[in-house]
Image (cartoon, rainbow, N blue to C red):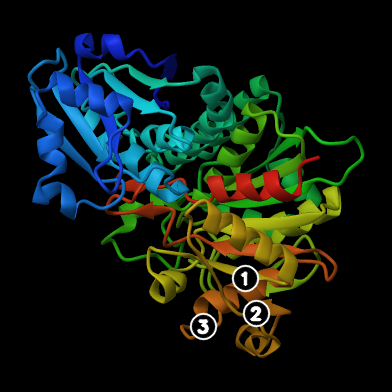
Amino acid sequence: MPTPAEIRFAETALDQIATLTGKIAVFVDMEGRMDPAGRKLNSLTRKALERLVASERFAKMAAGDLAVISYPAGLAAETLCVVKLPRRPNQAEARKAGAELAKAQNGQDLHVLAGTSPRAGDIALGLALRGYDFDTHKTGDKATPGKICFMVADPQALAKIAAPMAALAEGVFFTRDLTNEPANVLTTDDFAARLAAMQELGLQVEILEEPDLVRLGMRTLLAVGQGSDSPSKVVVMSWNGGKAGDAPFALVGKGVVFDTGGISIKPAAGMEEMTMDMGGAGVVAGVMRTLALRQARANVVGVVGLVENMPSGAATRPGDVVRSMKGESVEIINTDAEGRLVLADLLWYTQDRFTPSGMIDLATLTGAILVALGHEKAGLFSNNDKLCSQFLQAAEAEGEGAWRMPLAKPYDALIKSRIADMKNVGGRNAGAITAAQFLQRFVKDDMPWCHLDIAGVAHVTSETALAPAGATGWGVMALNRLIADHYED
């Protein structure tokens, strides 16, 4: 499986620059000023760097953009990568610069002359995140990744800053790997096994099998998976890094490993993308991995429901009525609105067992949120202004877009059932909102809660700033930041 690039940190040695092989990266500020490494390179290359900086091409470059000087005279390196970056870049500019270096590396050794850059850690994180390539199922010879070395004034200080960022990158990679995997590989059994393997990191992992779920009364979750040969499961991951006895913060994830729509079957065109319908559970898993790797001083529980939604003689039918773990009945109008059925029981179980201090669920829940917000932002619904604001601030700080959507009692009329306590869909109008209204019925009145509909951001068809096309890992960084800022001792 892909892993983040290993990045080494060393003290800047200007007298060694001429002998470095592979690729060298240097930073020049927005006015064309060079640091000592830049001036050394300019001298070695007979002012080739100076000529580039004076060019119209450099003038048109934005912060974080990169230009290349190939086979520069005076250097053993094949390429000199010149990155335009302010002396004090913001986080987004620094991570963009790192991402551009990742795209330019092309398997060669890379020496990044970061000097005294205050954002060298973010440059390294951007480089690591954009270096992701899901090539697990490709055959043939695979290129050996090049080595990466950051040459800086204080390598020990940078290594200390970079350590939690490396944990974050690994968590993002884990989420991307899970979300990219095909459904014949990432079965419910395989998914649960990958989560169980994180016990070696210090997580406590418990797997609830179908008999356990029957005993608990998780009938809406079981209804989704009953048409599949793959057994439904709930996996509970606990990280106890905070004070003993403190209530945990809870993350809850939808893990539909493949969604045909069930009896309400989806059109064939594009159905292959439904391998990503476990994206919410993937994000929860990635956050839990990050917390364990960086030894977070917080108590956090991650609960994910792993099911497969298939049509068969045993599958749930439109019109069936199922009673939830909470005890309320649901008329299933559309079996393709299955994610909310999974989450309903998970939300109730999580509150009933853990009494968390707050709770956030994540799900690739509705196409309606994609219509509303496209691929730029996740839809955020919440019953608590404080938690909502905290998450929005964390998401903005990490460059992960989210937008608050409304919850309001009048929308409940759209999911009123003639024969049950509620129905699982409310029609085309306000589809993402009625899904959130459905979920809110399984959240206790005093429980701070957010619902994140990530259908538009979990998996995309073109590259983003920090990820190639495919799974993005959206949400791991924002949730890690939220926990670090508000739930750690």
Residue 489 visible? The answer is: yes
Question: Camera-side residue: 65 or 425?
Answer: 65
Q: Amino acid at mark 1?
A: Phe
Residue of label 2: 407
Precedes in sequence: disc 3 or disc 2: 2
Q: Are circles 1 and 3 on residues that touch, CB within 8 Å?
A: no
Q: Are circles 2 and 1 on residues that touch, CB within 8 Å?
A: yes
Q: Is residue 250 left or right of residue 372?
A: right
Precedes in sequence: disc 2 or disc 1: 1
Q: Is residue 396 left or right of residue 482?
A: left
Mark identifier at residue 456: none
Q: Is residue 32 left or right of residue 260?
A: left
Q: Amino acid at mark 3?
A: Ala
Report helix, strand or loop for mark 3: loop
Question: Camera-side residue: 428 or 320?
Answer: 428
User: Mark 3 or mark 2: which is in front?
Assistant: 2
Number of numbered discs on residues: 3
Mark identifier at residue 381: 1
Instruction: Please report the residue visible at 60 percent of the width from the left and 41 percent of the height from the top.
Output: 287
Question: Camera-side residue: 444 or 35?
Answer: 35
Mark identifier at residue 430: 3
Where's residue 291, x and y in %? Answer: 65, 35
Where's residue 155, x and y in %? Answer: 49, 19
User: Distance of mark 1 from mark 3, alpha carbons?
Assistant: 13 Å
